[in-house]
């Protein structure tokens, strides 16, 4: 794991967006794995600006989102399809046919999960997977005790997760109880994982995921086994990490990060 500590959430989001933008510039037909959630709002806002102001080209890109709720239509304002359309897809020149989310209303959900896995494989795999981390350590909707080898499947959501998302639905009882999610194993197949975490509320679980044991209780800890995982955090989120001096030293000295150090400057 590479951990990059930025002074503010704004700088952490800007750095994350820049990594995506630079990948698209070097590989216009990149396959992007996308995430939803409040943490990603600033990332997508920056990517919109880069498209509108700098001509960042999405025309050849393909995207796969991590998850989707079961039981609500894609047209629902809180579906992840609607969220992605409103936050990114409608504002850039991506081909809608190349934007993929699981179908949470599929008649055969198990078949839909298999179809999603096969679509990722046909696309050549995911080049860069954006990730957040839940307060209980989940990746996508892989709740605690999910198999670290799991593939795309249906998953019941914990009361904690539903409570966290209750503000979007007007109460926890209105949050769908199940979702389709990429599995931990599916995520680990990505060639590059980039996890963004900001705010002091993520500090404790982030320390467990990065520096604690690899375990299914904290599914994000599986990223410790990934061949290339970059974790971008702000100072509050990094406040409980034990090896911050080392993380800062690596970021300051590794040549591959030289072009990005300004994003982490105070």
Image (cartoon, rainbow, N blue to C red):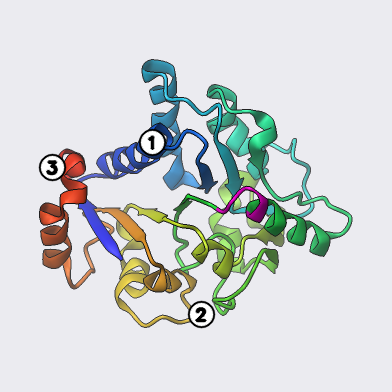
Q: Nearer the viewer, mark 1 or mark 3?
A: 1
Who's the residue at 73% across and 38% down the image? 76
Q: Is residue 242 located in the magenta-colored stretch of the structure?
A: no
Residue 142 occupies quadrant: bottom right
Disc 3 target residue:
265
Who's the residue at 64% across and 60% down the image? 181
> Could you tell me if residue 139 is visible in this image?
no
Of labels 1 and 3, earlier in sequence is: 1
Residue 198 point in image, percent of width and height: 33, 52
In the figure, 265 relative to 246: above or below? above
Q: Secondary structure at mark 3?
A: loop
In this rendering, position of residue 238 left or right of residue 197: left
Disc 2 target residue:
216
Spatial separation of the CA atoms under disc 2 and disc 3: 35 Å
In this rendering, position of residue 52 left or right of residue 243: right
Label 2 crowd bin: few (<14), some (14–19), many (20+), radius 10 Å: many
Numbered range of the magenta stretch: 121-125
- State which quarter of the image contains the N terminus: bottom left
Residue 5 occupies quadrant: bottom left
Disc 1 target residue:
26
Label 1 crowd bin: few (<14), some (14–19), many (20+), radius 10 Å: few
Magenta residues: mostly which secondary structure? Answer: loop
């Amino acid at each position: 794991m590479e951990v990059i500590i930025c002074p503010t959430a704004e700088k952490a989001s800007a750095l994350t967006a820049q990594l995506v933008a630079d990948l698209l510039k070097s590989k216009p037909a990149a396959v992007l794995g996308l995430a939803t959630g409040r943490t990603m709002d600033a990332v997508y806002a920056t990517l919109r600006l880069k498209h509108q102001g700098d001509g960042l080209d999405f025309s050849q890109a393909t995207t796969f989102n991590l998850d989707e709720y079961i039981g609500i239509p894609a047209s629902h304002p809180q579906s992840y399809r609607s969220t992605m359309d409103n936050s990114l897809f409608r504002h850039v020149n991506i081909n809608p046919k190349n934007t993929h989310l699981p179908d949470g209303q599929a008649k055969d959900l198990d078949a839909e999960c298999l179809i999603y896995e096969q679509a990722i494989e046909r696309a050549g795999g995911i080049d860069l997977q954006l990730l957040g981390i839940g307060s209980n350590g989940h990746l996508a909707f892989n709740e605690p005790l999910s198999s670290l080898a799991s593939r795309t499947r249906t998953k019941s959501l914990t009361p904690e997760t539903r409570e966290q998302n209750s503000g979007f639905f007007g109460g926890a009882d209105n949050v769908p109880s199940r979702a389709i999610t990429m599995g931990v194993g599916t995520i680990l197949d990505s060639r590059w994982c980039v996890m963004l975490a900001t705010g002091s509320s993520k500090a404790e679980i982030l320390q467990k995921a990065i520096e604690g044991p690899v375990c299914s209780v904290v599914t994000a800890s599986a990223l410790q086994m990934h061949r290339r995982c970059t974790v971008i955090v702000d100072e509050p989120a990094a406040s409980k990490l034990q090896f911050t001096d080392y993380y800062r030293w690596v970021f300051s000295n590794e040549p591959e990060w030289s072009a990005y150090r300004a994003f982490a400057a105070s």
